[in-house]
Amino acid sequence: MADETPDTPGPEDRKSGRETGQGGGPNRRDDRRGGAPRGGGYGGGERRQDRDGRRRDGASGEGRNWRGSEGRPRDDRGPRRDDDRRGGGYRGSDDRGPRRDDDRRGGGYRGHAARGGADRPYREDDTRVYRPRPDRKPEPEIPEHIEAGQLDRAARRELLTLSKENADGVARHLVASAECLAAEDLDGALAHAENASRRAGRVAVVREVLGFVYYRRAEWAEALREFRTARRLSGSNHLLPHIADVERGLGRPDRAIELSQEPAAQSLSAADRVELAIVVSGARRDLGQHEAGVQILRELVRASPPQRSWSPRLYYAYAESLLGVDDEAGAREWFARTVDIDRDGVTNAPDRLSELDGIDIVDYGEDEESGTDEADAHEADADAPDADEADVDGVAGPGTGPVGETDR
């Protein structure tokens, strides 16, 4: 009986093993392979013999690699862990089941068809995706006599941000648009201005020209959009009078008056301040404030000599304001003065004067019998300021500073 090996190692055996460093108890990886169920202690006797054998081999330094003499895994370790399909460990590729992207039963990643790709049915009402793009307007033909050098020098400087070829093309379209405006071809002017805007939409002078075309066409909303864009791009306030006039066209005279009171109006040139005063006078008349409309222009018109470039428009606006207060005699006088100085025909003063009393307007420039003497004398009279008219310096417009300085 003394030769029998005890089934369970005693406390002395376990203590001896810990002290000698030949084992710290059973190897837990081997304990998961099956066999007798684990119960918080050690496994069956056969496995204990295996472990004891390994401990004995380990003491001699031969069993630490867990391999036999030929370098192969020991047969008593059982199957490799990655071949064991019974547990919950790592599973090989053969029994993992279908791939996630092939599993259409649950959530997670879905294939292209499930996302609604090319196989998604076409929706007739899906205009957000399939709306056709509008056809691009063809480029209008530019007359051969128009050259890029005909554009104003300041405007050409703004085109320096473009390539030379594009800048030359844009410049020619701008010149062509101006020619069409002079010939009252508003459709042609719009075609050239729109083409220039498509090619150089971030250049202020291009948007300004397009705004003036819309202005002449009385398309107020479009003109306001282009003027505001040009003002923002350039940082200049010279378009403020035209923006205010567009507000009048849109039926917002109050807004036009508010614009004239902005601090930006203080920086306007003399000509632009006169234009703004004319607009504000008209806005007052739109509101039924006819006396205020006359007062805005009265001192300004008397301080503006006829040779000023803005005088024809100013005289004409003053005559219109006098009609608002039923002063036909005064209106006739200032319409006549406008006829005398409006050489370029910027106003329709002759027509307005004819409507009042039916007088005939004599064109001194075409009088063949009297030659040039009469025309020269008339021009001299127009250039000389009247005795009762002071210089424009020191006269303020509505909400602005002095209107003097030189004509710009």
Image (spheres, helix red, strand yellow):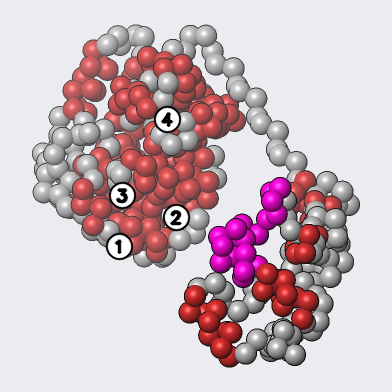
Residue at left offset 39%, top offset 64%:
254
> Percent from the top left, x then y, of residue 368?
36, 9
User: Which amino acid type is shown beneath numbered disc 4?
Assistant: Asp
Residue at left offset 52%, top offset 9%:
144
Residue of label 3:
276
- Of mark 1 and mark 4, the one earlier in the sequence is 1
Viewer-nearest of discs 4 and 2: 2
Specify whether 133 is left or right of 166: right
* 3D distance between C-alphas at marks 3 and 1: 15 Å
* 3D distance between C-alphas at marks 1 and 4: 32 Å
Specify whether 24 is left or right of 308: right
* 3D distance between C-alphas at marks 3 and 4: 32 Å
Q: Which residues are magenta?
A: 54-71
* 3D distance between C-alphas at marks 4 and 2: 33 Å
- Of mark 3 and mark 1, the one earlier in the sequence is 3
- Of mark 1 and mark 2, the one earlier in the sequence is 2
Residue at left offset 49%, top offset 75%:
20
